[in-house]
Image (tube, rainbow, N blue to C red):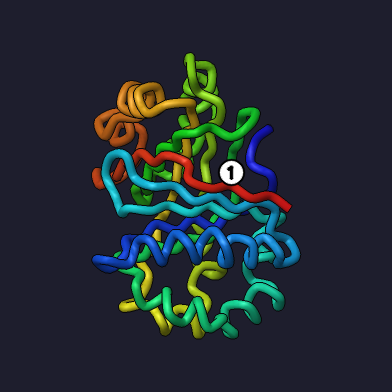
Amino acid sequence: MALLGAAVLAIWNDVAPGGDAEFNHWHTREHIPERVGVPGFLRGRRYAALAGGPAYFTLYETESLETLRGGAYIARLNDPTAWSRRVLPLFRNNNRSACRVTHSLGRGVGGTLATLRLGPLPDGETELRAWLTATTLPVVGEQPGIVGVHLCEVDLGATRVPSQEQKLRDRADQTARWIVLVESGGPEPVEMVCRTFMSSEQLARRGATGDSVLDVYRLLYCLAR
């Protein structure tokens, strides 16, 4: 099974020193269940960093980008719970990116996930997308241990939505451009295939900027509708 919907919300964040226990407790007991309860949200996952960072990565799969622009979700963002009001100020280095799913292959959910943040040069978008979707990701998806490969492209309109939750974080959110997600059963396969098939040099030859960032995470919690 590939990603469940046509859009995702991807969030990377650190937590202020001493706040990890509270963050993880809140995220499991309240935050992910609250989000998955919003119409159009299909599944939520939280990961902890194995290599790179920020320390946490959260992925929400949604029916469409309209879910992330929609009234129910925006209403939730503008009415944070008391617990959320205590925890959100602990966020650091937050990157929040609402994306359309351009390409998604696989079955199931892997225990390890690589997030590759990248972006096309102004004249490289078409070549880079074609190289990833027609050539590279299908090959990556066939490698031993890999269970899913996905390309997601940020939609700034759905991402940059002012909200009360945003005001509670310590600074304005950062935003990714394109995101490649690669899922596997363990850290070695997922990191190896990314470095083998999507190195910075290979990406640059196909029209990407030179500032790609690869991080590897392990699954902490997953909840579906």
Crowd class of label 1 (few under 14; some 14 to 19; many from 20; radius 10 Å): some
Q: x and y percent of residue 187 in the render?
A: 37, 28
Residue 109 appears in which quarter of the rendering? top right
- Callout 1, which amino acid? Thr
Give the tally of numbered discs.
Answer: 1
| Depth check, front residue: 5 or 197 | 5
Residue 7, compared with residue 131, is above or below; it is: below
Q: Inspect this view and state whether residue 161 appears.
A: yes
Q: Pick the quarter of the image with the N terminus.
A: top right
Residue 17, compared with residue 208, is above or below; it is: below
| Depth check, front residue: 49 or 105 | 49
Residue drawn at point x = 70 percent, y = 78 percent: 71
In the rendered image, the residue lying farthest to the top is 144
| Depth check, front residue: 124 or 216 | 216
Q: Inspect this view and state whether residue 162 appears.
A: no
Q: x and y percent of residue 52 in the render?
A: 26, 44
Decide if residue 10 is on the left or right side of residue 74: left
Residue drawn at point x = 70 percent, y = 67 percent: 38
Decide if residue 103 is on the left or right side of residue 48: right
Residue drawn at point x = 71 percent, y = 75 percent: 72
Residue drawn at point x = 68 percent, y = 65 percent: 67
Secondary structure beneath disc 1? strand
| Depth check, front residue: 59 or 88 | 88
Decide if residue 207 is on the left or right side of residue 78: left
Residue identifier under label 1? 102
Q: x and y percent of residue 13 in the render?
A: 36, 60
Q: x and y percent of residue 192 in the render?
A: 33, 23
